[in-house]
Amino acid sequence: TGELRHVLRGHTRRILTVAFHPDGKRLVSASADMTVSIWTIGKQNCDAIPYGHTAEVNCLAVSPDGRTIASGGSDGAIFIWDAKLGKLLYRINAKAPEVFSLVFLPDNVHLFSGGSDGIIHCWNVKSGKELTGSLNAHSGAIRGLSVTTDGMCLVSCGDDCTVRLWEQSKSLTIQKTETVGNIATSWWNQKNL
C-alpha cells in the first residue's frame, strides 16, 4: 500500500546501513555514531546497542540463520556479535584501513569482507581467524559484496567502476581451503560475464 509503518529513532548521527534479520521481525542498523542497533519491528526503542567500534560503522551482515551479526567500520575492524544478546563475540583486525562491505556464506560460518584496500578477505566467524589467502579483487575500494544462495558465486563491486563475479572452484570445499591453500588461486576463480 505504500503506507509508512514505523519510524525508528535512536542513532545520534547519520545511519549508513540497515539489514533485515532473517526472521523478518527485527532490523539491524549501523551509524556514523559508532554503534549498531538491533530493533524489533513495532517497538520504538532498540533492543540492544552494541558498542565497540571507534569510528563510523559502514556495513552490516546478518548470518542466514540469524544468530550472528557482523559489522565493519572505518576503524579497520570487523565485530562479530551474538544477534540475540547483542554481545561481542570477536573483534577482527580486517587488514584494510576501512571496511565497506560484508557478506555471510550460506554455511553461517564464513564471512567475506571488502574495504578500502580492494582486497576480499574470508573469515571464520566461529574462531575469528582468516582463511589462508585473499582475493586482490579491485584497484580501488570494494563497496559491495553478495553471494548466491548456494554460496558458489561471489560478486564484488568497487571504486574501479567494475563488477566482478567469482566462482567457487568445484574441486575444493571450504574446509579443504582452510587447511590447504590460498583462496585467491584455488578456491575462487574469476568468472567472465
Image (tube, rainbow, N blue to C red):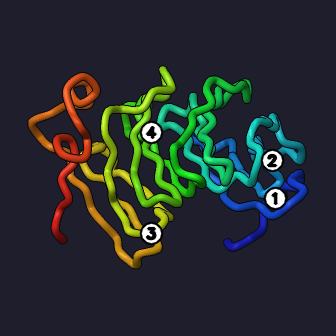
Residue visible at 78% across and 67% down in the picture: 4
Residue visible at 21% across and 41% down in the picture: 187
Name which of mark 4 and mark 2 comes first in the sequence: 2
| Residue at which label 3 appears | 140
Q: CA distance from mark 4 to mark 2?
A: 30 Å
Name which of mark 2 and mark 1 comes first in the sequence: 1
- Residue 42, horizontal then vertical, whole percent: 81, 47
| Residue at which label 4 appears | 111
Q: CA distance from mark 1 to mark 3?
A: 37 Å
* Quadrant of the image containing the N terminus: bottom right
SS state under label 1: loop
| Residue at which label 1 appears | 6
* Tag 3 and tag 4, C-beta contact below 8 Å: no
What is the three-letter code of the residue carrying label 3?
Gly
Q: Closer to us: mark 3 or mark 4?
A: 3
SS state under label 3: loop
Q: In the drawing, does residue 144 fall left or right of residue 23?
A: left
Q: CA distance from mark 3 to mark 4?
A: 21 Å
Name which of mark 1 and mark 3 comes first in the sequence: 1
Residue visible at 49% across and 28% down in the picture: 125
Q: In the drawing, does residue 142 fall left or right of residue 186?
A: right
| Residue at which label 2 appears | 42
Q: CA distance from mark 2 to mark 3?
A: 40 Å
Q: CA distance from mark 1 to mark 4?
A: 31 Å
* Tag 2 and tag 1, C-beta contact below 8 Å: yes
Name which of mark 2 and mark 3 comes first in the sequence: 2
